[in-house]
């Protein structure tokens, strides 16, 4: 596996582990009957996985609730995923797209080109270019687009997970074919992933992630309207006036900074799960592969680690019994986050994923043993 491919796999696994583990929130789904014929689920799965080259544009609405308190440095990501968000998307190709997150005062745009990623903040008139492709990062608005989210979820599925068909339904004014992935691994808290896609292009139009045991979706993301037409170049890459402030940064967010600046190195396996391939520069934050029960581990340095640990305690995190040190667990219907502190050495680790607490406790014991 190449370094580039390995870094992309780590990056998307991290995004999946955090985005897919949102807590339940009601969402009204259009119940208008849809005409047309269904598509055999395995064929639909192949169409979806092969749809990354299909251009589209439209409006997306996502609804979710992380169900966890804001922690220092992570509040932007949890805020994005803590309610209903509306975005416009212009997707031309894998490395040519724009997602505009609509806010009360304007919008925040994520722009992807062959030169990398840039972020435009309308309110502050600030354009920030990200140097390189971060190996790990927190979720952003672009990760909530149904096509990318659906493909990411399907890539997490293992041969043991069951793929079945769903009734055709109307999404964004179109008859959409559906499939359901039902998870087989008892260690994951995700019960199923429902996807509806355009049967001709394979572009996913709606994604629903449901916790184990059923109930309301923990995350719903769908296109409200869609056009399968190549967007104008000016929409994907708008021109900015000369007065716009521009800057460049080498890290995307707090997690990326931890990955690049923490000296702690994670082991090659934890809780029976292998770490995804890593390079020395980013081995401080690692994803451990296990399909939907994958999880990530990040060492939290010094004062920041103590701040996060105490913030979790103040927020009501429960004690988790470990063989050494002290551990706290924050849990929703899907997401589990464990903070473990090893005193007097002073090391703090954050473990998170759509997994049961027992799995992270095993991993935490191995980390501090």
Image (spheres, grey):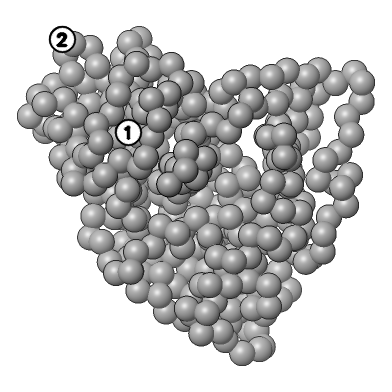
Question: Residue at point 61% right, 29% down?
Answer: 132
Mark 2 — residue?
Answer: 344
Rendered location of residue 164, percent (x, y) = 42, 79
Question: Residue at point 62% right, 53% down?
Answer: 145
257 vs 313, nearest the viewer: 257
Binning the other alpha carbons within 10 Å of mark 1 as few (below 14), some (14 to 19) or many (20 upward) gives: many
Rendered location of residue 101, percent (x, y) = 70, 41
Question: Residue at point 58% right, 55% down?
Answer: 148
Viewport quadrant of the C terminus? top left
SS type, badge 1: strand
Looking at the image, is mark 2 or mark 1 nearer the viewer?
1
Binning the other alpha carbons within 10 Å of mark 2 as few (below 14), some (14 to 19) or many (20 upward) gives: few
Mark 1 — residue?
Answer: 297
Task: Please give left or right for residue 71 compared with residue 327 in the image.
Answer: right
Dot label at residue 14: none
Rendered location of residue 265, percent (x, y) = 30, 24
- Tell me if label 2 and label 1 are in contact, CB under 8 Å: no
- Looking at this rendering, what residue extends furthest in the left direction? 323
Task: Please give left or right for residue 303 compared with residue 30 in the image.
Answer: left
- Looking at this rendering, what residue extends furthest in the right direction? 242
Question: Residue at point 21% right, 39% down?
Answer: 270
* Relative height, residue 180 to residue 277 (above, below): below
SS type, badge 2: loop
Count the marks. Answer: 2
67 vs 16, nearest the viewer: 16
Task: Please give left or right for residue 289 compared with residue 92 in the image.
Answer: left
Which of disc 1 and disc 2 is earlier in sequence? 1
């Amino acid at each position: 596996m190449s370094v580039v491919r390995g870094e992309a796999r780590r990056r998307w696994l991290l995004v999946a582990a955090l985005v897919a583990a949102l807590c339940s929130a009601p969402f009204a789904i259009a119940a208008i009957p849809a005409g047309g014929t269904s598509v055999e689920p395995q064929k639909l799965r192949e169409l979806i996985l092969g749809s990354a080259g299909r251009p589209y544009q439209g409006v997306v609405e996502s609804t979710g609730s992380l169900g966890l308190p804001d922690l220092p440095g992570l509040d932007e990501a949890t805020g994005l995923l803590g309610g209903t968000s509306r975005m416009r998307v212009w997707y031309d190709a894998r490395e040519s797209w724009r997602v505009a997150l609509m806010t009360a005062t304007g919008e925040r745009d994520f722009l992807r080109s062959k030169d990398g990623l840039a972020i435009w903040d309308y309110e502050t008139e600030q354009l920030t270019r990200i140097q390189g492709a971060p190996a790990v990062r927190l979720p952003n608005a672009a990760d909530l687009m149904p096509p990318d989210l659906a493909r990411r979820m399907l890539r997490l599925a293992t041969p043991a997970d069951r793929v079945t068909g769903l009734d055709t339904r109307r999404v964004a004014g179109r008859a959409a074919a559906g499939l359901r992935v039902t998870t087989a691994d008892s260690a994951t808290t995700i019960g199923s992933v429902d996807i509806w896609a355009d049967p001709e292009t394979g572009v996913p139009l709606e994604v629903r992630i449901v916790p184990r045991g059923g109930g309301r979706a923990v995350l719903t993301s769908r296109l409200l309207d869609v056009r399968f037409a190549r967007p104008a170049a000016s929409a994907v890459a708008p021109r900015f006036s000369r007065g716009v402030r521009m800057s460049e940064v080498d890290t995307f967010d707090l997690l990326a900074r931890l990955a690049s600046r923490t000296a702690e190195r994670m082991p090659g396996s934890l809780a029976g799960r292998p770490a995804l391939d890593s390079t020395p520069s980013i081995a401080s934050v690692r994803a451990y592969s296990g399909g939907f029960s994958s999880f990530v581990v990040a060492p939290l340095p010094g004062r920041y680690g103590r701040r996060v640990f105490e913030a979790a305690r103040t927020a009501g995190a429960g004690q988790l019994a470990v063989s050494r040190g002290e551990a706290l667990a924050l849990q929703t219907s899907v997401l589990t986050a464990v903070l473990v502190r090893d005193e007097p050495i002073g090391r703090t680790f954050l473990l998170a994923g759509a997994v049961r607490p027992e799995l992270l406790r095993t991993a935490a014991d191995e980390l501090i043993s």
